[in-house]
C-alpha cells in the first residue's frame, strides 16, 4: 500500500492511497468462489453454476463490496500510520477502480487543529460583589406570593396589575387580520405580553365596556405582514379581577419544602437559595467574560464536521424547548439559525480542552461527590440524588466535565485583571443575563 498526504488547509488533509491490483483481484475472486457455492440459477444445480456466469452476473457487485471494505480498512490504517486525528467522517472516493489495475482512492478529512494558546493577559474581568439583605429576602417573598396569587372578580375599573377577561379582534384598516382575535382571553395588565400600548389603554376600563384600541406593531415584529403596521383592536371587557396574595402562613410556607411552617426558617431557606443563585450568577458572568477573551485571543480554525454536530444538538434543544415532539424532524430547521452559535461553542470547547491538557487539570472522585452533594441540596431527598449520580458513569462524567471547565476558567482568570464591582442581588442576576443576551446577539450579527 502506498500512501501520501496533502495538506490542503490548516485542518484539512487529502490522503492518497494506492492498493496493488493483485490484492483486490484476489479478494474478489475468493469472494466469488464462496458465493458460487450458494448461487441458484435456472438450468443449473446449486453450486454448479459456471464461474464465468457467476462473474458476469455478480462480479461488479462483489467488486464494489470488496473495494468499499478495502478503502475503509486502508483509510483507518493510513490515519494511524500518519498520526492524524480526524474530526468527523471522511469523504472517500475511488479514482481508479478497474480489474487488473491498482486501486487508487482519496480520502478528504478534517483534523483537530493544533492549538498554541495565546494568553488573555491584560483582559479586565468585572466580578459582581453582592450581599443578600433583608429587603432582598422580603422582595423575593413578595414575588413568591404573586406567583401563587389567586384572582377574584372586583366591581371597579381596571388597574395596573389586574387581570381582565376580554374578547378582541384586530383590524388593518377595515380588514381583520389572521391571528388577531380571541374570545375569553385573560390578560394581566402590565405583563407586557401584548403589543406595546395595548395593555395601558385598558387601564380604567370596567366590565361591560367596549374599547377601541389603536397600536403600532414593532418594526421587528415576528409576523412580517404586521411589522410596523398601525392596527385597531375592538375589545369587549367581560370581567376585572384583582390579585389576591396568599398569607404567609403554614400552608403557604409548606409549599416550599419548609415543613415546620416557621416564618424564620422560611426566610432562612429563601436567603440560602438566593445566595446560591447569586453565586451562580457571579460565576457565570465571570466565566462568560473569560471565555470571550479566550476566543478573541485564539481565533483557531474550527472543523466543519464538529460545527455540524453541535448544530444538530442545538436543533434538538430548540425542538424540545418549543415542544415540537420527539418525532419532529430537526433537519427541517435551517442550519444558518444555529451555525454561528455552534461554531462559537466548538471553538470554546477546543480551547478549554487545551487549557485542561496543558495545565494537567483533573477532578477526583471526592471532588465529584462533593459537587454532587452541593447540587443535591436543592432536592427534598438529597441522598437519593447523590446515589443516582455516583452510580451512573455518564452523570459522573458530566459533573467531572463541569468541574474541569471551572478549573480551566480559574486558571485563565489568573492571567486577567479582576475588578470587583458592588451590585445588588437583582443587578447581579440581570448583568449575567444581559451578557448572555449580548453574546447571542453578537453571534446573530456575525452570522448576518
Image (tube, rainbow, N blue to C red):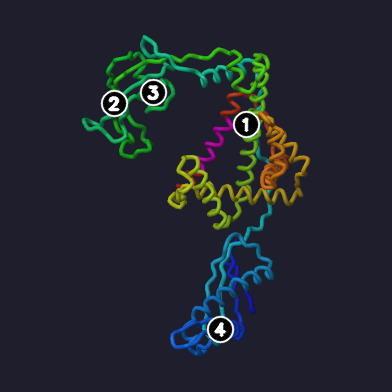
If you read the primary sequence from the N terminus, does the residue marked by circle 1 or circle 4 appear first?
4
Distance in Å between CA atoms under marks 2 and 4: 81 Å
Rendered residue at 39%/11% (across/down):
154
Q: Using the image, tell me which numbered label, if any, was put on residue 233.
A: 2
* Label 1 element class: helix
Is residue 432 inside the magenta stretch? yes
* Label 2 element class: strand
Q: Decide: marks 2, 4 in contact (CB < 8 A)?
A: no
Q: Which residue is mark 3?
A: 186
Q: Looking at the image, is 309 positioned above or below residue 364?
A: below
* Label 4 element class: loop
If you read the primary sequence from the N terminus, does the residue marked by circle 2 or circle 4 appear first?
4
Q: Mark 2 vs mark 4: give the one in front.
A: 4
If you read the primary sequence from the N terminus, does the residue marked by circle 4 or circle 3 appear first?
4
- Magenta residues span 431-442
Mark yes or no: residue 174 visible: yes
Q: Which residue is mark 4?
A: 37
Q: Quadrant of residue 121?
A: top right
Q: In the rendering, at what x and y percent does residue 51 appear?
A: 52, 89
Q: Quadrant of residue 168?
A: top left
Nearer to me, 162 or 382: 382
Rendered residue at 69%/35% (across/down):
384
Residue 318 placement, left or right of 180: right
Distance in Å between CA atoms under marks 1 and 4: 71 Å
Amino acid at each position: 500500500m502506498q500512501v501520501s498526504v496533502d495538506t490542503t488547509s490548516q485542518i484539512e488533509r487529502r490522503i492518497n492511497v494506492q492498493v496493488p491490483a493483485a490484492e483486490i483481484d484476489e479478494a474478489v475472486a475468493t469472494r466469488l468462489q464462496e458465493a458460487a457455492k450458494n448461487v441458484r440459477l435456472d438450468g443449473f444445480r446449486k453450486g454448479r453454476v459456471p464461474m464465468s456466469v457467476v462473474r458476469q452476473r455478480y462480479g461488479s457487485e462483489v467488486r464494489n463490496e470488496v473495494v468499499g471494505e478495502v478503502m475503509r480498512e486502508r483509510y483507518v490504517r493510513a490515519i494511524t500510520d500518519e498520526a492524524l486525528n480526524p474530526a468527523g467522517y471522511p469523504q472517500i472516493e475511488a479514482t481508479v477502480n478497474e480489474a487488473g489495475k491498482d486501486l487508487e482512492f482519496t480520502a478528504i478529512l478534517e483534523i483537530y487543529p493544533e492549538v498554541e494558546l495565546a494568553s488573555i493577559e491584560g483582559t479586565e474581568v468585572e466580578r459582581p460583589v453582592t450581599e443578600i439583605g433583608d429587603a432582598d429576602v422580603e422582595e423575593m417573598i413578595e414575588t413568591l406570593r404573586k406567583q401563587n396569587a389567586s384572582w377574584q372578580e372586583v366591581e371597579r375599573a381596571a388597574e395596573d396589575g389586574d387581570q381582565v377577561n376580554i374578547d378582541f379582534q384586530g383590524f388593518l384598516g377595515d380588514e381583520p387580520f389572521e391571528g388577531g382575535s380571541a374570545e375569553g382571553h385573560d390578560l394581566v395588565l402590565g405583563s407586557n405580553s401584548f403589543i406595546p400600548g395595548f395593555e395601558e389603554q385598558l387601564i380604567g376600563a370596567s366590565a361591560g365596556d367596549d374599547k377601541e384600541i389603536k397600536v403600532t406593531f414593532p418594526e421587528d415584529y415576528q409576523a412580517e405582514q404586521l411589522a410596523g403596521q398601525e392596527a385597531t383592536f375592538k375589545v369587549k371587557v367581560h370581567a376585572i379581577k384583582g390579585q389576591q396574595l396568599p398569607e404567609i402562613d403554614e400552608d403557604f410556607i409548606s409549599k416550599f419544602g419548609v415543613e415546620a411552617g416557621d416564618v424564620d426558617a422560611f426566610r432562612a431557606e429563601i436567603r440560602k437559595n438566593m445566595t446560591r443563585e447569586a453565586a451562580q450568577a457571579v460565576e457565570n458572568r465571570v466565566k462568560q467574560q473569560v471565555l470571550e477573551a479566550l476566543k478573541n485571543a485564539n481565533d483557531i480554525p474550527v472543523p466543519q464536521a464538529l460545527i455540524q454536530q453541535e448544530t444538530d444538538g442545538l436543533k434538538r434543544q430548540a425542538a424540545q424547548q418549543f415542544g415540537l415532539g420527539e418525532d419532529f424532524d430537526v433537519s427541517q430547521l435551517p442550519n444558518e439559525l444555529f451555525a454561528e452559535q455552534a461554531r462559537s461553542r466548538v471553538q470554546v470547547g477546543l480551547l478549554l480542552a487545551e487549557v485542561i491538557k496543558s495545565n494537567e487539570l483533573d477532578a477526583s472522585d471526592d471532588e465529584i461527590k462533593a459537587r454532587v452533594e452541593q447540587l443535591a441540596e436543592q432536592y427534598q431527598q438529597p441522598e437519593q440524588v447523590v446515589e443516582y449520580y455516583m452510580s451512573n458513569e455518564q452523570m459522573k462524567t458530566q459533573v467531572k466535565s463541569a468541574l474541569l471547565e471551572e478549573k480551566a476558567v480559574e486558571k485563565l482568570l489568573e492571567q486577567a485583571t479582576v475588578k470587583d464591582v458592588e451590585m445588588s442581588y437583582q443587578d447581579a442576576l440581570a448583568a449575567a443575563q444581559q451578557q448572555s443576551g449580548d453574546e447571542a446577539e453578537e453571534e446573530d450579527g456575525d452570522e448576518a
